[in-house]
Structures are given as structure tokens and as C-alpha cells.
Image (cartoon, grey):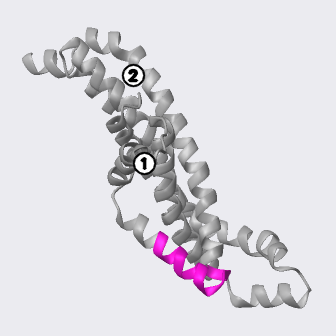
Amino acid sequence: MELINTFFNWEILVESFPILLRGLGNTIFLGCAAIVFGCAGGLVLCLMRLYGPRSLKYATVFYIDIFRALPILVILILIYYALPLAGIRFTSFTSATIALSMVLAAFTAEVCRAGIENIPRGQFEAASALGLPFWVTMHKVILPQAIKIVIPPLTSNCVSIYKDTSLASVVAMPDLLKQATDAQALMANPTPLVGAAIIYLAFLWPLVRLVSHLEERSKQQRSR
């Protein structure tokens, strides 16, 4: 009974639920913003790495390697706490969005590169023989085929980014984890943290299953 009253107190869970829902809304908004900017930036980085001039390729590879290696928490702290020393200040939400987007862009660039390089060279040659400009070839021929390949790993990266939104609590953004931590302190009971874990599970588990479904579907299409 002591365990239940401490970690699964129903009254406290019900009382803290509206607070947790506000945090969930912020978490979803942050995740969506990071995914939109991260995926768009990653596609740009991919094209720069594959088709840009040599100096730009080297700079892009350097960016991708650095931001795939650095922990998101380190980047977030640098943006939120170090940049103000240089006169550049961002809100906690903006800082978290920038940090998550920069990391997701690096991983997305590698996923997209693998997808584009998996397209047979003959597709490019056929488009060139038809006189299609480069950007038309990418838009009409290459990317529609590559997107089918990159959707499973890209979706997996997006799920990971949603989990990493919990790091935004470090810079006092009122996301789900921060709201749960505040509710825990206010009510002197860890039940709100358990409630936050349940909400994370209910929100992310369907996305995890979606990733598995997309991977299985991709395997079936490749085997045909």
C-alpha cells in the first residue's frame, strides 16, 4: 500500500492531470517544430553534400559529423546559456527548437543521402536524356522514389526527437517533464512523474509501432 500511495496516488494523479496536459501540448508543439525545421534542413544539407561544390561538401560533412556526435543536451545548454554572453538571446522554446532541429537535420541528411544514393544511376541518365533540368529531375523523378526508402528511418528519428524534447526541461521550458517535476514538488509526491511516463508511453508507443509497420512494409516492397 505504501508503494501505491507514493507512486500511484489516484487523487494526486487526477489533480495533476490538467497540469500534465498543458505540458503535453508544449511537448507536441516543440516536437512538431523541430521535425519540420530539422527535416527541411536535413534535405538541404543532403543536397549540398551530394551536389554542392567541394568546399561546401566538406563544410556539410563537418556539420553532419559534429552534430551527430554531440549530445543534444550539450547543444541546448550552449545555445541557451552560452550565446547570451555573445549578446544573442533566445527563449527556452526557441533554444530547444534550434537544438533539436540542428541535430535532427544532421541525421536526416544522412538518411536522405542513403535514400538518394540507393536510386539506380539509370534514373538520372534517363532524366538527363529527356532534357530535364537538375531540380526538376530531383523533384519529379528522384525524391518521389527516395522518400519510400527513407520514411522508416526518418520516422524513427522523429520518434527519437519527441523523446528528446524532455531535455527542454533543463532550460525551464514548461514541457511535459518540467510540468511533472513542478507538480511533484508542489504536491510532495512523485505520482505526477509516473503520470508523465504514462502519457509519454500512450503518445509514443503508437509511433513506435508505426515505425515497425513501415519497416516491415518496406522490406516487403523490396522483396517483390
Residue 149: percent from left, percent from top: 60, 70
Q: As drawn, is 100 to the left or to the right of 55?
A: left
Asked if the residue under mark 1 is in contact with the one under mark 2, i.e. CB atoms within 8 Å, the reply is no
From this viewpoint, is residue 189 visible? yes
| Type of amino acid at the residue the image marks with label 1 | Leu
Q: Could you tell which of marks 2 and 1 lies nearer the N-terminus?
A: 2
Residue 47: x, y in percent?
65, 74
Q: Quadrant of the N terminus?
A: top left
**Which residue, given by chain and number where applicable, does mark 2 sit on?**
20
Does residue 17 lie above or below 159 as drawn?
A: above
Q: Amino acid at mark 2?
A: Leu
Q: Nearer the viewer, residue 80 or 5?
A: 80
CA–CA distance between discs 2 and 1? Answer: 30 Å
Q: Horizontal and vertical percent for residue 159? A: 46, 50
Residue at 42% across, 43% down? 84
- Local packing at callout 1 (Cα closer than 10 Å; few below 14, some 14-19, many 20+) is few
Magenta part of the chain: 50-63
